Amino acid sequence: MKMHNANHAPSVERALDVIGLLAGSENPMSLAEILAKLSIPRQSLIRILNTLCDRGVVERTGQRGFYRLGMKLLYFGDRLQDKIKLRSIGRPLMRDLAEKTRKTVELSTLDRDQLILIEQVEGSEGIRLYSRVGSAYPYFHAVAAGKIYLADMTPEKRHKALAAIGLPPVTEHTITDPDVLEEEIRRIQEKGYAFEDQELRAGVRRLVAPIYDHANRLAGCVGVAATIFSLEMDQQEDLAAQVIETAKRISHGMGRSR
Amino acid sequence: MKMHNANHAPSVERALDVIGLLAGSENPMSLAEILAKLSIPRQSLIRILNTLCDRGVVERTGQRGFYRLGMKLLYFGDRLQDKIKLRSIGRPLMRDLAEKTRKTVELSTLDRDQLILIEQVEGSEGIRLYSRVGSAYPYFHAVAAGKIYLADMTPEKRHKALAAIGLPPVTEHTITDPDVLEEEIRRIQEKGYAFEDQELRAGVRRLVAPIYDHANRLAGCVGVAATIFSLEMDQQEDLAAQVIETAKRISHGMGRSR
DNA sequence: TTCTTAGAATCATATATGATATTTTAACAT
DNA sequence: ATGTTAAAATATCATATATGATTCTAAGAA
């Protein structure tokens, strides 16, 4: 937990800590469990929980003293999604792509220097989803969408960003050699899409294309995620054409001229 | 805003007021706008906003002094959805139903005496969604899912609930006569599904069936929503069979024996 | 039934709050 | 391009109130 911060509301900080803890827990948590994880005095914690429960952001389970996330968060999350233009434009087109390819379609965008997954549509392959809506991808270099963003930067900016983080290996397939990454980025710029071959997660491949807005700025990325069994290397070119077409349609909806 | 409440955290109350206000606004709001709507001293509001912004729950737009909901709410909402068993079981089956019927499929459940929409799958008719995920339906008697819950109550409990609220008209089609509603409930109990004929919203029909859990308790409802043009009266029986089948499959996943 | 702990009540005080002053910033006018 | 202005954002400080420690009560698990 952070140090005292000027111009903050400490009680609100604590409330967000509680929500974050419950969000990360698979099961409802008891008061004692929450106390053990967060350094909040017991009575203060109870007051915060009372407040969050009365507002539906946290809910008490049938069992006394147990708490879980509340339905109000569904409402907030849904209202937020409706406000994101990229998502409302992209969603029907993603559904078309999911039907055609039968793969999971992902939409992501950069938000405060983080690459966030903002929507997913499952294809009829019924493959379990790979990442969670709202979560941030780690490490640009290991994610197809991240590589799109890297390819969109000037070389100076890119080198600076990569020098700050380095190229840590996520899986044994992750690109850790700067020269290999530069070659990859050149290929992306040339072909207009990025391919991720088990670099973020073993057994998972992604093929992703960039979306531009009315001012020709990179607004986000759309692509498909699948297992190595359902996305084989020789399908790449065909699939790329479909993904790029979807990205162009979304770009058009964002106001980009063709 | 509520009066001072013992064993609450007032700052957290205020923070939730801010989030709720931004959730209900179509556009980002300025500090002055928020100040005009909520009776929070300016300095206190700024501290709360600083805290929420640093945590990603609220975000500053490019324009100085403007605020909107932040992406962290996507994450929280998504984590909550994954925790709702009814949703994770129902979602793939809802998608099947949406493909077959081409209509919007809705999943709802009772949460703290409110009927909450917890998931929606759009059908390829591409009809604009009728209600928002996370939001509560008003008035049980005007909603197909609400009528399912009314039909599941003992007559005593139902009369008590309806006496407390009455049968206010929502549209000109809403049932406002207790005897008509009782007849409707008898039909629901007999046929195993509820039909909503423009009772909540003009031009909208719904057909909804109940989902039961391992203890044979009513766990939720699944159904389709459509316009009166795409859901005509003579389709009712055929569609009901499909909806009831989906509800039974979800019930089976919830542990109900057949 | 007993025991444990969540949850409420109480009260002194620590600190968060709110009022006020100052600084910063961006929008707008020239 | 420069200057002005309004309002966001920060800093300061006295004090109001929220907090935290402690005690008591209620509820539920074993």
Image: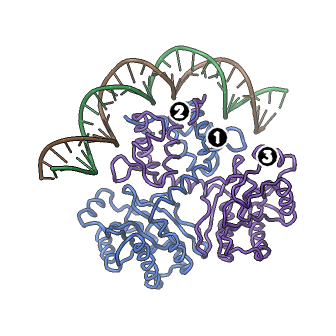
Chain colours: A blue, B purple, C green, D brown
Q: Chain of mark 2?
A: B
On-image quarter of the C terminus of chain A? bottom left
Q: Nearer the viewer, mark 2 or mark 1?
A: 2
Q: Is residue D25 above or below residue A138?
A: above
Residue pointed to by mark 3: B161
| Mark 3 in CB contact with mark 2 (< 8 angstroms) | no
Label 3: state its secondary structure: helix
Residue at the extreme front of the image, as rendered = B172
User: Could you classify mark 1 by the number of other residues whose Cα lies within 10 Å: few (under 14), some (14-19), or many (20 or more)?
Assistant: some
Q: Nearer the viewer, mark 3 or mark 1?
A: 3
Residue pointed to by mark 2: B10
Label 2: state its secondary structure: helix
Amino acid type at circle 2 is Pro
Residue pointed to by mark 1: A30
User: Could you classify mark 3 by the number of other residues whose Cα lies within 10 Å: few (under 14), some (14-19), or many (20 or more)?
Assistant: some
Same subunit, tags 3 and 2: yes
Q: What residue do we see at 59% from left, 49% from top?
A: A72
Same subunit, tags 3 and 1: no
Distance from the alpha carbon under mark 3 to that under mark 1: 32 Å
Q: Is residue A84 above or below residue A67?
A: below
Q: Earlier in the sequence, mark 3 or mark 2?
A: 2
Label 1: state its secondary structure: strand
Q: Nearer the viewer, residue A142 or A119?
A: A119
Is A214 on the left-hand or right-hand side of B250?
Answer: left
Amino acid type at circle 3 is Ala
Q: Chain of mark 3?
A: B
Q: What residue do we see at 62% from left, 45% from top?
A: A56
* Image position, residue B236 (x, y; %): 77, 73
Amino acid type at circle 1 is Ser
* Image position, residue A194 (x, y; %): 39, 74
